[in-house]
Amino acid sequence: MALKIASYNVRGLNSPSKRSQIFGEMRRSKSSVLFLQETHFRASNFPNLSFTYYSQWFHRGSPSSNSKGISIGLHKNCPFPLTSQLCDVEGRYIMIKGTIGQHLYTFINVYAPNVNQNKRLKNILHIADSFREGTTILGGDFNLMLNPLLDTSTNKSVHSQKALRSLTLCLAQSHLIEIRRTLHPDSREYTFFSQVHGSYPRLDYLFISKEHFQLCSRSDVGSIILSDHAPVFVDLAAPQAHTSYRKWRRNEQLLG
């Protein structure tokens, strides 16, 4: 079946009224899989998300802080028999693997910290390479701009070019393609407004496994309304029945 993936830093979901607003916005966008970051759910206290349209949920929260937390939600019309799940104890990532229809998917939701992003993201990619199978969708709030010339209104970044090139190489070695930038090479939409720096950066990304990029038909950036981030979306066509899947593993020789 065709899917619409949404990634959204929601800046807290403990308020029932805000949950209703966020899920209503996602339903109107016709999103079938939700990657939510900064839910502010604690590891020991997840709310009952009894929203009519999104009935299957996977959560990870921080055991020590309300400022993190990530969730993946699936629409009621998108049953997802789970085969495997892997989570970060700090609430920085969640990986789930299962089937939709007859096709295997891996969904990876990431909420990077605001320091040492490069190191943390590379570590998550290394873990993901041993976990993921089928059509992989990786997305979330990276808390950095991969391409400062296009991904921020100031054309500048606090991260060194060397660090950003290293992360970009790591993504390429993991056979992951950034959907929005590939479909729209020169676009300058931003997903966050930094009051501290008075600038607009793009911090939120969606990637797909390279061999399945042809499934991507559309990518959009929403508006900054209910959170301090904008949601990002991608539409995926249904994989062909004859599509074969194999597990991607990092070529360690490339890292030498």
Image (spheres, grey):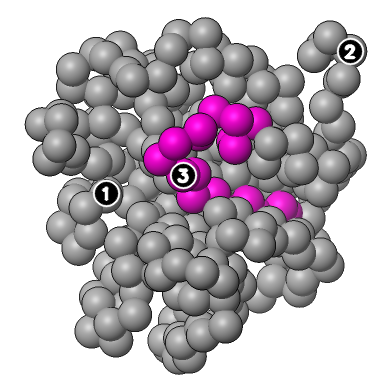
- Foreground tag (2 vs 3): 3
Q: Residues within 10 Å of mark 3 (few under 14, many from 20)?
A: some
Direction from residue 34 to residue 243 in the image, left or right: right
Note whether 43 is above or below 179 in the view shown.
Answer: below
Residue with the mark numbered 2? 253
Direction from residue 245 to residue 14 in the image, left or right: left
Q: Quadrant of the N terminus?
A: bottom right
Q: Can see residue 102?
A: yes
Nearer to me, 144 or 51: 144
Question: Does residue 112 show up magenta in the picture?
Answer: yes
Question: Does residue 102 show up magenta in the picture?
Answer: no
Percent coordinates x, y for residue 133 in the rendering: 81, 47
> Where are the magenta residues, as a range?
105-122
Q: Quadrant of the C terminus?
A: top right
**Residue type pointed to by label 1:** Ala
Asked whether the beta carbons under mark 3 and mark 1 sit within 8 Å of each other, the answer is no
Which label is found at residue 230?
1
- Which quadrant of the figure has residue 60? bottom right
At 66% from the left and 62% from the top, the residue drawn is 89
Local secondary structure at mark 3? loop
Which label is found at residue 219?
none
- 2 or 1: tag closer to the N-terminus: 1
Percent coordinates x, y for residue 237 in the rendering: 58, 47
Residue with the mark numbered 3? 113
At 61% from the left and 46% from the top, the residue drawn is 137
Give how far apart the Cα atoms at labels 3 and 1 are.
18 Å
Q: Can see residue 217?
A: no
Note whether 86 is above or below 159 in the view shown.
Answer: below
